[in-house]
Image (cartoon, rainbow, N blue to C red):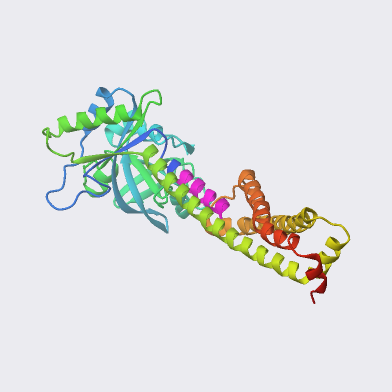
Amino acid sequence: MVTLGNGATAAVQEQISGLGANILQIRPGQGFGRGGGGPSPPDFDEGDVEAIREQVAGVSAVAPQAQSSGIAVRNAANWSTTINGTTGDYFTAQQWALSAGRIFTPAEERAGKAVCIIGATVQQNLFRQAAPVGERIRLRDISCEVIGALSRRGTGGFGNDQDDVVLMPIKTGPRRVTGNRDIRNVVVWGDPAYDSATVQASISSLLRERRNLKGGEPDNFNIFDTAQISETLSGTTRILTGLLGAVAAVSLLVGGIGIMNIMLVSVTERTREIGIRLAIGAVAREVLLQFLVEAIALACLGGVIGLLLALVASVSLAPLLQVPFLFDPQINLLAFFFSALIGVVFGYFPARRAASLNPIDALRHE
């Protein structure tokens, strides 16, 4: 149970790492959405992006994003996907490499050229095994040249397919596809040499000033630190893993009671044998040691069999639960020694009962 719990923790950390390291996500509103009742907070503009890039220390890359959905078409194939208008800083901020082709040039960004870079999911559905670079796809009424293909990244931290995306220069993408010029997300990649909290506070102060927020007014934007999200979710899964371990400990306790009952029955069935041993000179501590060793051997043998069964179950269940199998020698040794301890604790009471029998009464037992 602990092995699967550790695998779940590792799976969560791997998915969160897909968001990138040292990354701040800036969105309008006070939560993941765009706020509750009342007027919607204003989106960001290019001036906000330039101000963050030029005025905040510790910022290595700033990538605005304007997203919309659309259908990508190539010949007879079509695929509904996310169109993300951004800049060349996006690839630096997200630390996302290309599997083929190149990124946008500054000239293409300024001119709003109809060029695009596609994710692995889009490539698979539109091009199959064909090379996409140099080909053209259509996004609504725009014919777009594919200049690059993103490397596969898989599922994101929130269960989304990160590879199902088409990246275009921000002046080309959603602006020309839907007419939307709003920047609803800004990705900031911080310099690892700078403290993330300090960079976050500087961005917050700058945006409050640019959005004319007074001292008592709450922020109408939010900044998410991916490291904090990762720590929070990993901490939650660790707590759940500890809970699973506690449940397993209760089952071991119940197993110990079973061992005690079996040994008590063994003492009753072997009363005459115990009486004969005591009558020919065995001392009480030798009888006590005999039954205690039997209880410990029984518990240890059960522990080894249990570990082998747990190993097989973990290897079988991990793929079904879509979590990695992580073998932890420490937790396996702990389980084995706990089994031995169960034998000592619950085997002592039957052993003491056997050692305290009166030899005459034991020989008369039928």
Does residue 315 belong to the magenta stretch? no
The answer to which image quadrant residue 93 occupies is: top left
The residue drawn where x is 67% and y is 60% is 349
- Residue 153 seen by the camera: no
Q: Is residue 265 left or right of residue 230?
A: right
Does residue 8 belong to the magenta stretch? yes
185 and 336: which one is in front?
336
Q: Quadrant of the C terminus?
A: bottom right
The answer to which image quadrant residue 300 occupies is: bottom right
Q: Is residue 366 left or right of residue 318?
A: right
The residue drawn where x is 56% and y is 56% is 249
Q: Which residues are magenta?
A: 1-15
Instruction: Give the x, y percent position of residue 286.
Output: 80, 54
Q: Quadrant of the N terminus?
A: bottom right
Instruction: Give the x, y percent position of residue 357.
Output: 75, 64
Instruction: Give the x, y percent position of residue 98.
Output: 47, 37
Secondary structure mostly seen in magenta is helix
The answer to which image quadrant residue 218 occupies is: top left
Image vertical order of residue 117 relative to residue 246, above or below: above
- Residue 138 seen by the camera: yes
Q: Is residue 47 left or right of residue 272?
A: left
Instruction: Give the x, y percent position of residue 336.
Output: 67, 51
